[in-house]
Image: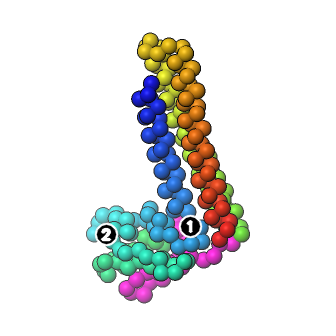
Amino acid sequence: MDAVFAKTKEKMNKCLDALERDYKAVRAGRANPAVLDRVTVDYYGTATPINQVAAVSVPEPRMLMIQPWDASIIKEIEKAINTSDIGINPNNDGKVIRLVFPPLTEERRKELVKDISKRAEEGKVALRNIRRDAMDDIKKLKKNGDITEDDLKDGEKELHRITDDFVMQIEDMEKKKEKEILSI
């Protein structure tokens, strides 16, 4: 049964990591290079992440500067940013691309908080699905005669405790990100 718990914790940790990556990609008024993580550039026929073809820096709190290592792909980078869902128009001076993040309006902050809450709820649903699968594994152990009825009850309690711990971590992440957005 310990193997079931270890596998469950591993899956739940991956769920938390995915949510954390999602939260980092949320544009919260500050320049954060993580917003470019999902943007890929057509680099000689291969979809390549921007951070693999250019240096991304934060010269000012609300500006990202992208300096490609190969100047011939600056137009491709600009095109990739325009077609992405970032919502910022790149400024190209021929050598570097600048992304200026506008200050967030109150309405946009509320939209972001709703989006963060939605993502947190999706994370909790994923945790519950992982718990359900682990519960099925424990019930299979009982059915096969590998554990007793008492072990089954103890396993269910432990699984519930593990899930509650991870749900609390998601709620903490959600509160932290909401506070970050609302305090900008």
Residue most extreme to the bottom: 93
User: Going 50% across and 69% down the picture, which residue do you hit?
Assistant: 32
Residue 26 % position (x, y): 55, 63
Instruction: Please rate how many residues cluster around mark 1, counting C-alpha atoms within 10 Å: few if below 14, some from 14 to 19, many from 20.
Output: some
Q: Amino acid at mark 2?
A: Tyr
* Among the 4 quarters of the image, the one containing residue 113: bottom right
Query: Would you say 87 lies left or right of 108 here?
Result: left
Foreground of the two, 79 or 26: 26
Task: Tell me the element at label 2.
Answer: strand
Q: Is residue 40 above or below residue 121?
A: below
User: Going 54% across and 14% down the picture, which residue do you hit?
Assistant: 149
Residue 175 % position (x, y): 65, 55
Magenta-tinted stretch: 84-105
Instruction: Please rate how many residues cluster around mark 2, counting C-alpha atoms within 10 Å: few if below 14, some from 14 to 19, many from 20.
Output: some
Residue 86 % position (x, y): 52, 68
Foreground of the two, 153 or 38: 153
Q: Is residue 144 above or below residue 105?
A: above
- In this picture the colour scheme is rainbow
Q: Amino acid at mark 1?
A: Arg
Residue 142 % position (x, y): 48, 16
Instruction: State the CA–CA distance, disc 2 to disc 1.
Output: 25 Å
Foreground of the two, 11 or 149: 149
Total marks in image: 2
- Between disc 2 and disc 1, the foreground one is 1
What residue is shown with label 2?
A: 43
User: Going 64% across and 65% down the picture, which residue do you hit?
Assistant: 181
Dominant SS of magenta comes to loop
* First along the sequence among labels 2 and 1: 1
Q: Which mark is residue 27?
A: 1
Foreground of the two, 1 or 69: 1
Residue most extreme to the left: 44
Q: Is residue 122 visible?
A: no
